[in-house]
């Protein structure tokens, strides 16, 4: 659910934040006030490509931020996409004048394509600038399956198809020509022998580099350690000896003046630590390995490791992983279980099972299609299309050349497309080709009312723009009633010019332009009570007319519609 939308330096909006609520929300205002700009901003937050044209004049950057509350289903989608899956998610889009954009999901940079795939589970925008899902025949299948409540059977189909594909890939591997398999095995054995001969360890190259550095400076290190030990302890006039003498002298003097006792104590401690440091240096020098052959061995080992890294283009950690992968592949090649005939029988069994699930899916879809064709007509009639005809065409998927599954796919084997006819005397044609933007929005509204599953309604935000195109009167009321019905189970946002629709909303926001001395801005206010009646009167064409206000009040107080937000 969308909780908040904020835009800064976006077109005519300077800095505007809207807090949305569950239920039915409407945005109203004069033509050109900026209502559709807000829907465009929400589309940007859902992955639409940005344009520098949306940056406010005189500004270098524009920002869009959308705060969402995610339900369990949406958090699962985000987690599967590798995104943070908190209960609250802030999506932020930044558009720079130079054309560069930045996209973040709860502070994490995210590719635009990934955001778009995840955001479609949060918001679905249906408006004059959107390619509504009804233009995509893939979505026709999704809508029909939702209407038929086929979620469990679809999941079974997806699992059966995935297992079948894996079995088919294993069979294809085994059916490689004997020469290919032999050549592959020979190459793998050569690589494995080479890797096992060198036998690299992760991090070994860094250890050897450090050791080589020590050996290269051995003389300098040994000389430095010996000189330091001699100065501290064993040489004439060594530091330890002088510290001892000074400490002894101060102890005698402390008998006269006790204030010198602390200095004597500190010098005694310094003498002890100096002796210990000298001992460490002596042990370092005594144990120093100045073997020239060891340096040669380190250089040779480093050369072998670098050769492997250059040849395979990988780090030592990746080379170790590659060695294990080669062993596993050679094991599979030589496994007695790698029997092509046995695997083919298993593949055929899995294919038969997948075909059975696909057949059941197809049967259920045909039943649901006939039911949907009947149930949607009253909805379309109420939404201003009394003579509309709607048909669901289900046809077998045409296999592509070389398709091993004969048209079977992850969703079954059905291609589904909606056909529509608005005028008597003309045959139904593909919906995506003949329906106008307003018709598409209303058809989608009818399908949403009929086909959206309960768990999806709760978390999904539906945004409708242009749903009121070319309608009025009773049809507008019918559209508003259905939007309100959807809002009771989730969240609906609607941009409208019709008071019949706006009067039914649970929450009403008005967008208006503010003309300044040098520039124009836009602002949004949430309306309550008398302010809302005034806005409805304006939409009726008579903002300060008492009759218009009385009619606006009647719109909100028809039987079963009394709205607590009005006085």
Image (cartoon, rainbow, N blue to C red):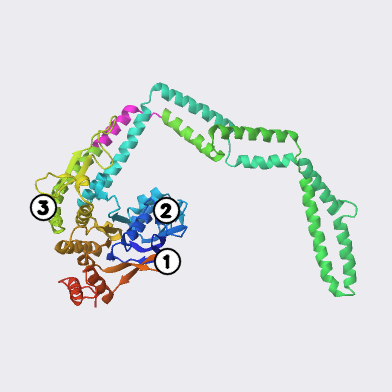
Residue 190 at what x, y percent from top left?
52, 26
Residue 286 shows up from this direction: no
Q: Please tell me whether mark 1 sits on a helix, a strand or a loop.
A: loop
Rate crowding at label 2 as few (under 14), some (14 to 19) or many (20 or more) other CA atoms within 10 Å.
Answer: some
Residue 243 shows up from this direction: yes
Instruction: Determine which residue is flagged by label 2.
Output: 52
Q: Please tell me whether mark 2 sits on a helix, a strand or a loop.
A: helix
Residue stretch rendered in magenta on the structure:
334-352
- Point out the tag, 2 or 3, that comes first from the N-terminus: 2
Position of the C terminus by quadrant: bottom left
Q: Nearer the viewer, mark 1 or mark 3?
A: 1
The reply to whether dot 1 and dot 3 touch (C-beta < 8 Å) is: no
Instruction: Determine which residue is flagged by label 3.
Output: 387
Relative placement, left or right, of 15 versus 433 is right
Q: CA distance from mark 2 to mark 1?
A: 22 Å
Q: Nearer the viewer, mark 2 or mark 3?
A: 2
Instruction: Determine which residue is flagged by label 1.
Output: 518
Please, which residue is most extreme toward the left here? 425
Residue 507 at what x, y percent from top left?
28, 68
- Point out the tag, 2 or 1, that comes first from the N-terminus: 2
Query: Which of the two residues, 209 or 552, is positioned nearer the viewer here?
Result: 552
């Amino acid at each position: 659910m969308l909780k908040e939308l904020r835009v800064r330096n976006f077109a005519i909006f300077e800095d505007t934040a809207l807090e949305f609520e569950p239920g039915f929300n409407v945005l109203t205002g004069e033509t050109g006030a900026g209502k559709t700009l807000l829907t465009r901003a929400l589309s940007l937050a859902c992955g639409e490509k940005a344009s520098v044209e949306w940056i406010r004049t005189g500004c270098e950057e524009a920002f869009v931020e959308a705060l969402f509350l995610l339900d369990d289903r949406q958090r699962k989608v985000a987690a599967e996409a590798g995104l943070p899956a908190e209960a609250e998610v802030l999506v932020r889009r930044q558009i720079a004048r130079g054309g560069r954009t930045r996209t973040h999901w709860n502070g994490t940079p995210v590719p635009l394509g990934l955001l778009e795939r995840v955001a479609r589970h949060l918001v679905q925008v249906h408006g004059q600038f959107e390619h509504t899902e009804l233009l995509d025949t893939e979505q026709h299948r999704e809508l029909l399956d939702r209407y038929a409540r086929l979620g469990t059977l679809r999941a079974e189909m997806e699992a059966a198809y995935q297992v079948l594909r894996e079995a088919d890939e294993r069979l294809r591997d085994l059916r490689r020509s004997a020469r290919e398999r032999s050549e592959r095995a020979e190459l793998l054995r050569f690589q494995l022998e080479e890797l096992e001969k060198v036998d690299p360890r992760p991090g070994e190259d860094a250890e050897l580099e450090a050791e080589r550095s020590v050996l290269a400076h051995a003389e300098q290190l040994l000389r430095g350690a010996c000189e330091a030990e001699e100065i501290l302890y064993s040489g004439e006039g060594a530091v330890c000896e002088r510290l001892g003498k000074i400490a002894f002298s101060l102890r005698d003097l402390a008998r006269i003046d006790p204030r010198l006792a602390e200095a004597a104590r500190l010098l005694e401690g310094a003498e002890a630590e100096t002796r210990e440091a000298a001992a460490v240096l002596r042990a370092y020098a005594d144990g120093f390995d100045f073997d020239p052959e060891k340096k040669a061995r380190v250089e040779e080992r480093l050369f072998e490791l670098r050769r492997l890294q250059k040849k395979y283009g990988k780090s030592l950690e990746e080379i170790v992983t590659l060695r294990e992968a080669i062993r596993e592949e050679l094991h599979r090649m030589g496994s007695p279980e790698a029997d092509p005939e046995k695997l083919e029988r298993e593949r055929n069994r899995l294919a038969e099972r997948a075909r059975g699930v696909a057949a059941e899916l197809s049967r259920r879809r045909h039943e649901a299609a006939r039911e949907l064709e009947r149930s949607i007509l009253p909805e379309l009639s109420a939404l201003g299309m009394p003579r509309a005809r709607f048909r669901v065409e289900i046809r077998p998927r045409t296999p592509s050349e070389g398709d091993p599954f004969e048209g079977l796919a992850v969703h079954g084997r059905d291609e589904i497309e909606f056909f529509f006819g608005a005028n008597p005397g003309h045959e139904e044609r593909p919906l995506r080709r003949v329906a106008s933007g307003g018709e598409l929005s209303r058809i989608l509204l009818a399908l949403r009312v009929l086909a959206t599953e309960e768990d999806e309604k709760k978390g999904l935000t539906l945004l409708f723009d242009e749903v009121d195109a070319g309608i009025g009167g009773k049809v507008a009321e019918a559209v508003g009633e259905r939007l309100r019905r959807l809002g009771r189970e989730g969240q609906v946002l609607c941009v409208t010019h019709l008071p019949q629709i706006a009067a039914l909303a649970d929450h009403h926001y008005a967008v208006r332009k503010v003309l300044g001395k040098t520039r124009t801005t836009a602002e949004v206010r949430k309306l309550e009570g008398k302010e809302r009646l005034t806005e409805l009167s304006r939409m009726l064409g008579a903002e300060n007319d008492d009759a218009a206000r009385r009619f606006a009040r009647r719109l909100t107080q028809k039987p079963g519609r009394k709205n607590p937000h009005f006085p």
